[in-house]
Image (spheres, rainbow, N blue to C red):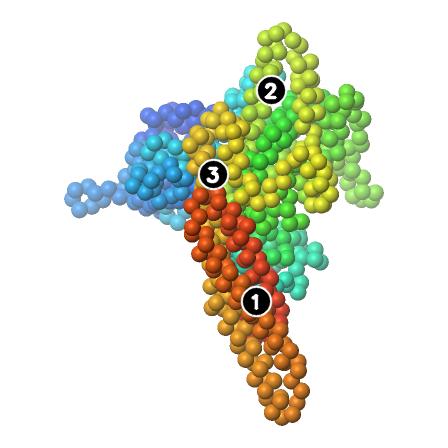
């Protein structure tokens, strides 16, 4: 019998949220803190002691004994160092204390985190700074305080700081546009995000028998399963009772942490599932998604399962993404990407739409590199996810609006009612746009869905790019329109001319067809759109002159921070493949080779026994010869891979190393996989040394 859970009571009970702050903080302190949280004002340092005391009292009442500054270094994980609240009194006892200084600032060692050369090993000091716009929470008896992380010399060493900078830049320019349209009340525009999270669940017992899953998150070897997703019977199918129990437990944990887990269902591939939250600010959404991934993995273990967040854990079935639903909302509740009943007449909406389209067309390389990882390269363009070519889907209605603005024609109104032709079924309003699941960047009614983000990625990176490139277009629009008004030009005419020119110049980025089709790649090339197939193609564009101008102009990154991040992205790429390659070699030497030799011996022994009694042994001998040939091939390719791993040690430039791993090491790993998978198909199940992909995918029963 299901537990009677009062969700409204437990939701956010472990979060020091606005409701709790209002109850526990002095009225004036709460007012000042709320101004920082909602309006982007500088934090009043005088309130820190009061906030720290209230936060500590609340946390201790809920059983917390420690606190941590929780931050997001330029790795793929979050970081934390726990300190207790205890303070000695001098008489052998302790009291629980937490000061404003401890709340506002921490000093973790900055030398052991990736810095791209910003910090040397001997330059250890770094700082964490309290982010009051993201709520503190309690987890496992510890008070978690979201913080930014920077070096002693002031450079951002994390993903939160540039995200907050990009949100400020976007708000500043968006408010300028709103003022031009007569809006005098909006003080801030917030980039909002809802990050859908795809993941796989497999039984812990099969996971522990696969070194590749344990060390790399994906199966480096494995023949295609006998049954995959070809029957389309898993997507939205009945949820397995064991998985359903996991999902209920997950919701319970996330709700207590204030994460608005809303939707859950089976995804396309066997063992694949999805969770989607309700929107929040881009900063809070990034924090909550990092928390969600951690809770998913811990909850799965409680249920005897393992949650896989790799973008492509299994060949032959779909990989996992993280659809980044991005929109713009004002602090007084207006969605700036909502077209309204008549998009043609909603000039303010069209202005923001034009800015987004222009941004994507001018900076597709940045959007591509924002999702560039070794794991995501296996997914993008694989007829299951958006291709590596960035394009925008608008849908039929908005596409006609854009064409009409360019040509000066009018758009005929269409019947908005949807009639299913059955009397007992209700009529309902038809959406202004269809869905295009093949598009990398699709308008879905009142937001854009950036579908290229990988399952394991921090959504902060993609949203830093999105916020900044749109801020740049809004800046250009505001400059042009403000100048037009200063020249006594009619505003409506100036906006019209701006929209016509923008849509005409950037229509090439709009594509409403099948982005999986090879014909689109040819068409995209004719349009001049870049096709950055791999991460090593995309990442160096971070250092393009126009990229540096963009980020430094909006104070999102300094030039030094850009160079550092480029180096870190390239290092993360080749280090990932390096771990995979060494794991592959280890599995061949210590798992596959002994299994192959044991089966060969079995075949030869069987053949000898049959010959000894006068029976024909041709079948066994032929099988043994075939397997021996594949064994020789496997051993040779493994030796070649080891040689490449030795050879790369002589390369010093980070870009050259990344290219070598992509062109040489990864290519050789793929060759080795083909041979090993061929052996798997020719060796008896009792002799094969690891669970097959099919066994893994259907392991949760």
Residue 6: x percent and y percent?
52, 46
| Mark 2 neighbour density, 10 Å: few (under 14) some (14–19) many (20 or more) | many
267 relative to 35, above or below:
below
Number of numbered markers: 3
Residue ID at (54%, 80%)? 601
Q: Are marks 1 and 3 in contact (CB under 8 Å)?
A: no
Mark 2 vs mark 3: give the one in front. 3
Given residues 563 and 434, the one toward you in this image is: 563
Give the quarter of the figure containing the N terminus. bottom right
150 relative to 698, above or below:
above
Mark 1 vs mark 3: give the one in front. 1
Q: Which residue is mark 2?
A: 477
Work out how far the residue at label 1 is from the one at label 3, CA to CA, in angstroms.
Answer: 38 Å
Secondary structure of residue under mark 1? helix
Secondary structure of residue under mark 3? helix
Given residues 355 and 570, the one toward you in this image is: 570
Q: Which residue is mark 1?
A: 633
Query: In this view of the protein, can residue 358 be seen by the observer?
Result: yes
Q: Earlier in the sequence, mark 1 or mark 3?
A: 3
Work out how far the residue at label 1 is from the one at label 2, CA to CA, in angstroms.
Answer: 61 Å
Check the image and name the residue furthest to the left: 91
Quarter of the rendering containing residue 56: top left
Residue 101: x percent and y percent?
30, 33
584 relative to 68, above or below:
below
| Mark 1 neighbour density, 10 Å: few (under 14) some (14–19) many (20 or more) | some
Q: Which residue is mark 3?
A: 566
């Amino acid at each position: 019998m299901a537990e009677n859970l009062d969700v409204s009571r437990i939701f956010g009970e472990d979060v020091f949220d606005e409701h709790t702050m209002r109850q526990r903080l002095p009225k004036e302190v709460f007012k000042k803190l709320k101004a920082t949280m909602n309006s982007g004002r500088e934090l009043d340092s005088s309130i820190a002691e009061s906030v720290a005391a209230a936060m500590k009292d609340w946390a201790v009442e809920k059983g917390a004994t420690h606190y941590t500054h929780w931050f997001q270094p330029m790795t793929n994980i979050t970081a934390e160092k726990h300190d207790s609240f205890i303070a000695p009194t001098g008489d052998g006892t302790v009291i629980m204390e937490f000061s404003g200084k401890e709340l506002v600032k921490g000093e973790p060692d900055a030398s052991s985190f990736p810095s791209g050369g910003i910090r040397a090993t001997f330059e250890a000091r770094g700082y964490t700074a309290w982010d009051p716009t993201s709520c503190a929470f309690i987890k496992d008896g510890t008070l978690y305080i979201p913080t930014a992380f920077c070096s002693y010399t002031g450079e951002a060493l994390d993903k939160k700081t540039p995200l907050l900078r990009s949100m400020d830049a976007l708000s500043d320019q968006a408010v300028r546009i709103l003022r031009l349209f007569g809006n005098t009340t909006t003080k801030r525009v917030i980039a909002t995000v809802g990050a859908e999270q795809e993941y796989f669940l497999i039984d812990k017992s099969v996971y522990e028998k696969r070194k590749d899953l344990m060390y790399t998150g994906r199966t480096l070897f494995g023949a295609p399963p006998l049954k995959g997703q070809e029957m389309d019977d898993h997507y939205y199918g009945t949820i397995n009772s064991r998985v359903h129990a996991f999902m209920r437990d997950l919701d319970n944990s996330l709700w207590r942490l204030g994460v608005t887990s809303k939707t859950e269902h089976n995804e396309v591939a066997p063992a694949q599932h999805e969770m989607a939250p309700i929107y929040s600010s881009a900063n809070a959404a990034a924090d909550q998604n990092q928390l969600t991934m951690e809770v998913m993995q811990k909850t799965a273990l409680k249920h005897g399962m393992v949650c896989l967040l790799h973008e492509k854990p299994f060949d032959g079935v779909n990989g996992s993404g993280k659809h980044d639903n991005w929109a713009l909302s004002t602090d007084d509740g207006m969605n700036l990407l909502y077209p309204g009943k008549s998009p043609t007449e909603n000039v303010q909406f069209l202005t923001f739409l034009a800015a987004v389209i222009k941004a994507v067309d001018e900076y597709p390389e940045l959007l591509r590199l924002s999702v560039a990882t070794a794991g995501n390269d296996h997914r993008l363009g694989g007829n299951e996810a958006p291709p590596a070519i960035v394009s925008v889907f608008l849908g039929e209605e908005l596409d006609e609006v854009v064409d009409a603005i360019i040509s000066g024609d009018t758009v005929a109104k269409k019947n908005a009612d949807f009639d299913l032709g059955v009397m007992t079924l209700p009529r309902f309003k038809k959406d202004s746009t269809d869905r295009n699941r093949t598009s990398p960047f699709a308008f879905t009614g009142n937001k854009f869905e950036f579908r290229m983000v990988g399952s394991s990625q921090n959504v902060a990176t993609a949203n830093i790019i999105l916020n900044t490139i749109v801020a740049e277009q809004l800046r250009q629009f505001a400059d042009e329109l403000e100048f037009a008004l200063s020249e006594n030009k009619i505003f409506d005419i100036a906006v019209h001319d701006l929209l016509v020119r923008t849509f005409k110049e950037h229509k090439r980025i709009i594509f409403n067809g099948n982005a999986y089709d090879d014909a689109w790649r040819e068409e995209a090339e004719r349009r001049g759109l870049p096709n950055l197939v791999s991460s090593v193609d995309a990442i160096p564009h971070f250092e393009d002159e126009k990229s540096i101008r963009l980020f430094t102009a909006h104070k999102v990154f300094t030039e030094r921070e850009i160079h550092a991040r480029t180096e870190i992205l390239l290092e993360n790429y080749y280090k990932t493949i390096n771990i995979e390659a060494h794991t592959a070699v280890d599995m061949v030497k210590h798992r596959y080779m002994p299994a192959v030799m044991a089966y060969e011996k079995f075949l030869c022994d069987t053949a000898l026994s049959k010959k000894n009694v006068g029976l024909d042994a041709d079948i066994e001998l032929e099988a043994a010869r075939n397997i021996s040939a594949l064994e020789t091939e496997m051993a040779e390719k493994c030796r070649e891979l080891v040689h490449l791993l030795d050879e790369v040690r002589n390369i010093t430039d980070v870009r050259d190393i990344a290219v070598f791993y992509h062109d040489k090491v990864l290519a050789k790993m793929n060759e080795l996989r083909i041979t090993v998978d061929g052996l798997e198909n020719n060796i008896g199940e009792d002799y094969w040394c690891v669970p097959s992909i099919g066994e893994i995918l259907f392991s949760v029963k």
